[in-house]
Each structure stands twice: as structure tokens, then as C-alpha cells.
Amino acid sequence: MPLLELKDVHARYGPIRALHGVSLRVDEGEVVALLGANGAGKTTTLRAISSMTRTSGEIAFAGRGIARRSPEFAARLGIAHVPEGRGLFPELTVWENLRMGAVGGRRGGFEQEAKRVIGYFPWIDRRRDQPAATLSGGEQQMLALGRALVSRPRLLMLDEPSLGLAPTVVRELFAIVQRLNEDGGLTVLVVEQNATVALDVSSRAYVLEVGKVAVEGTSDELQRHEGVRKSYLGY
Amino acid sequence: MRRYLSVAVGPLLFVAAAAVVALLPRFMGEFRLLEFTLVAIYVIALLGLNILTGYSGQISLGHGAFVGVGAYVAALLSLGRPGLELYMLDPPSWIPIGNGMTPVFTIPIAALVTGVIGFLIGIPALRLGGVSLALATLALAVSFPILMKRFSEVTGGGGGLNLNLPETPFGWDISTRHWLYYEAWVTAGILFLAAWLLVRGRIGRAWRAIRDGEVAATSSGVNPALYKTFAFGVSSAYAGAAGALFAIETAYVNPDTFPVSLSILLLASAVIGGLGSLAGALFGALLYEFLPIYSQEPPIFSFHFADQAPSVVFGVFLIVIMLLLPGGVAGLLRTLAGAVRTGRFRRRSETSELA
Amino acid sequence: MAVPARAQRLELNVGPVLRSLVLGVGFVVGAVALLVLLGLVLTQTETAFSWSGYAQQIVSGLSQGAIFASLALALVLIYRTTDVLNFAQGEMATFTTFIAWSLMHHVSYWPAFALTLVIAFIGGAAIERIIIRPVEHRPEIVIVIVTIGLLIALNGLSGWIWNPEVKAFDSPFPNGTTEIAGVVISYQDLGVLGVCLATVLLLWAFFRFTTLGLVMRAVANSQDASRLLGVRVGWMLALGWGLAAVLGAVAGMMAAPSQFLDPNLMLVILIYSFAAAVLGGIDSPIGAVAGGLILGVLINILGTYVDFIGGELRLPAALVVLLIVLLIRPQGLFGHKVVRRV
């Protein structure tokens, strides 16, 4: 049974249709990449999963229907959604942001999880009392990732984590995502415009075009796929 | 054919309303006449408030104060210096009050003075944005009676100023009350048409653009601050005209005639009558005048509610209208009329510019 | 929305508690210096000036200001969570004060006080759930009008239930005065100041040290981000309204003994509190408290030492001062720059 499954999901913002029947699935322990150009519907797909937008169609998480519920419902089931722009609380400190990861649903064990996160991002411990607004873009992304981990998610959804970051930072970030997947068996659904990096990390990938899945396959297949190469990998 | 009809509906309704207003006095005693004269005055004040809130999207909790300013200006002008001296008042010589004017001429002057004052107050208040505007206007409403009492050498202080009821002019064979009734309604009619021209024209379009999105309006070349301040001035002028008529009609001004509750209930009436619709001012005015009477002594029940019942009813009305009918009474009627015309109900027609 | 990164980083590891402490001490020192300076000016202009009388005015100003501060904090609390000015805040406070007045006929002061706070909390939360929630996503102007409707209805209702005659309201503090360093201070002023500041401190501790407080601060920062972390934002908003109502109830019960109780008890206080909140920066809790205290002291000094203002023109004078401050610093003393919503 797949962990997450979307069947023919439609979504619209007012009169503008953003998704025209997206179907995809994510299995336990996988890293799945969702690729596509600007406006293809990648972010909307994640927002649909978190019920942050109006949808029709079926969305199931661990065999349970989660479409048209609420963002907090999805979060409490164990879906950690790191949105575009990271969704940090700028006025709260680094540590308070981290603590917020543990408040919804599955309580307890914060200290232990926080220790694990500090293992990945040692700077968090040193700068715990600094307001999140004063962090650099890469640090913000890492804090958002750390906060998502604190909630002990069954599925981690990352929306354009590389946006606005320097290439070395992007590589570092994706290396950590890969380690989380390999060491801890974390399931990840990552939306990216930077297809090169995303395909390196993921096992399978979907390419969205105008609100529909245009190509799908294993990451190796997609890296060899001529259309994908031309449009998204640039060679 | 149908198109011509719907274009003609507005003017036809206006003419019909005018006819009703003209004929009404035949069926009324002096007391009822007084009540309906007050309705005309509230129509004027609410037109101004509707221009401000309904069309330019700003909230004023201080319109009672502007009505008060208009009333005091009219009272001072029609009493003149000799009249004030009867009160043993000693206004400073730089205040330009002459020998007492014919009351009717004080109306445009009161409107102008109040409009200018409103415009001037609007400049700093609007620079500060929505929150501060609401605060500033509310503060104005609270301060007005205090100021009138404090500067008693001009205003007569807490005792207020008594005026004389004017004579019917031109040797017309109607009572003073009838004359005042027509005076108020003719003024209301003129100001209604003026408001109609204003909101239909270029300025009205700019106001609506600002109300529906200030940033977008700015990028299409409208200067929001200027237009908003202008709306504030115009609506104050309307309040001033209403105040002048109020002073003439009741022949008495006093600081406590214009308490905070006047300002707040005026806004409530404007909203319940229907924002963004000039006809809403009429419904709001009827409500303002008659709701207190009928909610204290409801016609169906044979007991007297507390004096506070009207404000409870007003408050609950206001909340319910906002929850269910953002277009107010006028919006509701328009939806119903639309339903009759097309034979079916459309939810929330174009009336609810607020929602 | 992306969090703007600042080029220069704060490597200095100052705890948030220490930081607010430093800010508070700095503020107090600055205020005292200003007051001393003003006193020195007054010694030159006022013939009958005495330092002890001046200090007395400041203390009673602080006590009045503490009431403004409580209500201003309530306004800021709701402004930060619901993004709207609650015009009914004063009437909610008056209504709960009437409830306290009724309770005090049956039980003694402090139990009635505590019971009133509980009722206020439930009432405030209920108002959010029942009346505000349906208009939550409508334009700001609609929510403001709803709170104005609430103001009108509650004002009428408290007059209807308890009749509009002026009532005496008990004070828990003794009537006499005490002398501290030559300054005569009434127990009344001291008590009001103490209760208001204790409430504010408790609230601050709640926000700073509890998980629930943290979650509420997060919701005030970003509702969407909170939702994605599993926070039930609706209940947090109701909690915010409940706490605001509690603050209002404290302000009402502290104001009632000296002002007497009638349905319009909090109207003028509400305006001072608005002014205090705007003065401090409408989105800043510290600003609201500081603004309230500043305003209280200011109107007392202006009213005492400026003959033209006297007793009657305190409110207009305070508003003129506010206007001047805002024209120089539109975001208020402690506020952040306003970002226009598109």
C-alpha cells in the first residue's frame, strides 16, 4: 500500500484552474521528486495534499482519505509540509521555532528529537536565542527542515528548498535529505525546479506540465529521458 | 425594451419617492411631520457617511461631531452677534458672525465650513491609515461635547443656544412646521442628486477603485490620499448640512445633543441601510428615526421595553446584517428585485461591494 | 513569505528574558530622566511648584495609566491575532464589571474578582467563536463593523440588565494614604497599579514560558505556518479573545471604584487605551503597556500644570500629543514599520 496516493486531483484558485487531474503515489521509504516549470502546479499539488486549497479528487494517506480536511489535520497525521518561503516565524527565536515542530499532534520526545536535529545542524544549538528573521536563507531552510523533523513525520514535503540558495548550500541541504532517507528511512516528497539536484537524490520522479503529470518514472529513467533532459536538465 | 426599463428604474423610483414625500404631510399631524423632517436630516447625514464608508471604504465613528459642527455654525450665524449678546456671551471679535442670517442661507455655509474642517482633519488622519482614522474619528466624537462645553463664551456651554423657529417665507400659506419639512426634504433631494452625480462620475470611480484595492488603484494613476481626503471632506460637508437643518428644525443646540452614541448609531444605520447604495441612506434614516420608538414599545407586545432596547436591537441588527446581508436593506431589495425580474434568486448579487 | 535575512548576524547570545530586561530598564531610566527634566522646567514656570506634589501627580498618573495599559494590551492581543481593532473591548470590560458588581452582593471581593475573570474568559472566547469567526476571512472593515455592533449591543444590554444609574463599586484597597520618601501616595493608586502590573506580568510570563503561550505567539506571527504544524488556529484565536477579555475585566474592576460604574464606564478609557496602543505601536505588547503608562502620566501632568487644559481638555490634549508623535513616527514608539497588504 502506498503511503500517499493522489487520484485525479483537480484544484483551482478562483476562476484559474491550477491542477487538471494529477495522480501520483509515494511509497514508504522513498524520495520522490515533483518537477516542472513555474506555474505547472507543483506547489498547488503540495497545498492540495495539506488541504490549503480547494480540490476535488481523492487523496489518501496511509489508506485514509485526507482530501478537503484541514492543514492541521494533515499535520497531525504525520505530514510535515515545509512550504515555499519556509514558513518560519520571524519574530520567534531559533529554538522557539524548533519547539513549534513538536506542538501539533504527536507530543513528547522533543528533547530527543531536538538532539537528533542538532546532530545534523550543530549551529542551531549555538544560536538558539537568535530571532529567526536574522538567519541567512540557507540557515532558515535548514531550521525549517529541522523543525519538520522534530515532529517525527511519516512524510516530509519540501517545497522548492533550493530557492534562492547558493549552489553549495543546496548540495549540503540535499545531502542531508539523502542521509535522513538512508539512515532513518524518512519518506520525502520534494518539489523542485532544480531538476539536476532533485533527480540525484530521488528514486522516482514526476514531471508536471500545465497541471498534469506529463512524464513519470524512476529518476534514472528521467535523467536519460530526452524531453526531460532538454527542458529541465539543460543538455 | 427591458434594458431601457432597467435604466429608468432609478429615476422612476426617485420621482415616486419624491411624490410620496410631497404628499405625506396631508396625512400627518404636526408631531409625525417633525419625525419625518428628522428623517430627511438623517438621510443627508447618512448620504455623507455612505460616500465615505460605502464608496471610499473608510470608517468614520465621528460623524455626529460633524453634524454638531454644522449645527453650531448654523446656530451662531442665525443668532448673529446681537443674538449671542442676549445670552451674555462674548465671542472673540475675529469670529465672523454678523447680525443674524436667514436660517436657510446658513445651510450651505455650515456645509462648507464643516467640509473644510473635515478636509483639514482628514489630512493627518488619513496619512496615518485605517486604524488611526477610526481612532481619530471616535476621539473626535468624544471630544466634541467636551470642547463645546469648554469654549462656552462662543457656544453657550452646557446650556446650549436657543433659536427662533423661522417664519414661513414668501407669504406661503403653510405652517412653519410644513415649511421646515419641505425645506429639509428639498435639501435632501438636491444633495441626493449631487451624491448620485458624484459617485457615478470620475471621482466615484476613483473612490471605488481605492476601496477595492488601494495598491492597484495607485498603480493605475489614482492618488489615494487625495481622493480619500476629498471623500472625507465631502462627507463632512453633508454632515454639516444635516447639522444646520437640525439646528433650524429643533431651534436648539446643546453639546449633549451630539453625543458619541449619535456618531456610532449613524454608522450603524448607514451599514444596515446598505453601504455602497445611495438608496440605503433612506432606509438607514427611517431605521434611525423609528427603530428606537418601536423597539421600546413594540406594536405587537403591549409592554414597554427598557430605554436600552433600541441599542441592543441596533447592535444585533448590525452584526446580523454583516454576517448575512453585507449589502444591507438596499442590497436585499436589489437582490429581491433582481429575482423578480429574472425569476430566480442569485446569491449575493453585485450589491455587496464589501464582501 | 520568505523571512528576510539580515546581513549582519547577532552572534552575541543574549537571552530573550535578559534582552527585555535591558529594554525595560532603559525605558524606565529614560522616562525618569525626562520627568526630572520636565520638573526642572516646571520649577521655573510654576510659582507654586513642589517636587513632592509633582511626584504625587506622577504616581496617580501611573495608576491611571496602568488601567489604560491593561486595556491597551487587550487591544494589541486581539490586533495581533485577529488583525483587527476590537471596538467592543471597552464594553466587554464594562459588562464584566457589572457582573462583578452583582457577584459582590453574594460573595466577598476577591472571590468575586476571580469568578469574574473566569466568566470574562469564557465570554471573550465565546464571542470569538460565535460572532467573529464567521467574518474572519472577510475584509477588515466588515470585522470592524461587527465589533462596533457588539459595542452598541453590549452597551445597551448592560444598561438594560443593570439599569443605567450610576453605581458605587467597592474597592479592595483601604482608603488612606502612605508616605514614601516624602511623597504622599494613596493605597488606592498603589493597589490599582499593583494589580494591573501583576496581571500584565502574569500574561507576559504565560506567553514567554509556556508552550501554549509560544503557540499563540506563533499564530500571531503566521497563521498558515502554524496550521501546517498542526496547530488548531481557531482555538488559539478564541483563547486570545478570552485573555483579552480577562485583561479588560481587570481594567474595568480597577477603574470602577474611582469612576463609578455605569454603562459608559469604559468609553473614554477605551479611547485612551486605543491612543496608548497606537502610541506604543499597535502591534507591540510592550509598547501598549509603555504607551498606557506614558499617557496616564502625561495627562495628569498636563491637566495639573497647564491651565488651559485643566480637567476638561485632557482627552483632546492627549490626542493632539498622540497625533504629533505619529506624524513623526507613524509606526509608534515600539512598533514595526507597517507593511501594506496587497
Image (cartoon, coloured by chain):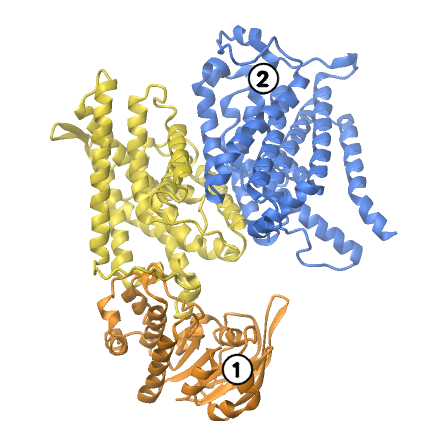
Q: Nearer the viewer, residue C189 or A137?
A: A137
- Give residue A8's position: percent from left, percent from top: 59, 82
Q: Secondary structure at mark 2?
A: helix
Tell me which chain the residue with mark 1 is part of: A
Q: Which chain is yellow?
A: C
Q: Farthest residue in the front direction?
A: A235
Residue at 29% in and 68% down: A99
Q: Which mark is residue B328?
A: none
Q: Along the horizontal axis of the image, is B144 left or right of B269?
A: left
Q: Farthest residue in the left direction?
A: C181
Q: Amino acid at mark 1?
A: Tyr
Q: Which chain is blue?
A: B
Q: Secondary structure at mark 1?
A: helix
Q: Residues within 10 Å of mark 2 (few under 14, many from 20)?
A: many
Q: Nearer the viewer, residue A59 or A92?
A: A92
Q: Residues within 10 Å of mark 1 (few under 14, many from 20)?
A: some
Residue at 79% in and 15% down: B173
- Give residue B145's position: percent from left, percent from top: 47, 25
Residue B310 visible in rendering: yes
B329 vs A178: above or below: above
Give the labeled residue for mark 1.
Answer: A232
- Give residue A175's position: percent from left, percent from top: 34, 83
Q: Amino acid at mark 2?
A: Ala
Identify the hue of chain A: orange
Same-chain check, marks 2 and 1: no
Give the labeled residue for mark 2.
Answer: B75
C143 vs B253: above or below: below
Tell me which chain the residue with mark 2 is part of: B
Q: CA distance from mark 2 to mark 1?
A: 78 Å
- The reply to whether discs 2 and 1 touch (Cβ–Cβ < 8 Å) is no
C292 vs B156: above or below: below
Q: Along the horizontal axis of the image, is A202 left or right of B268?
A: left
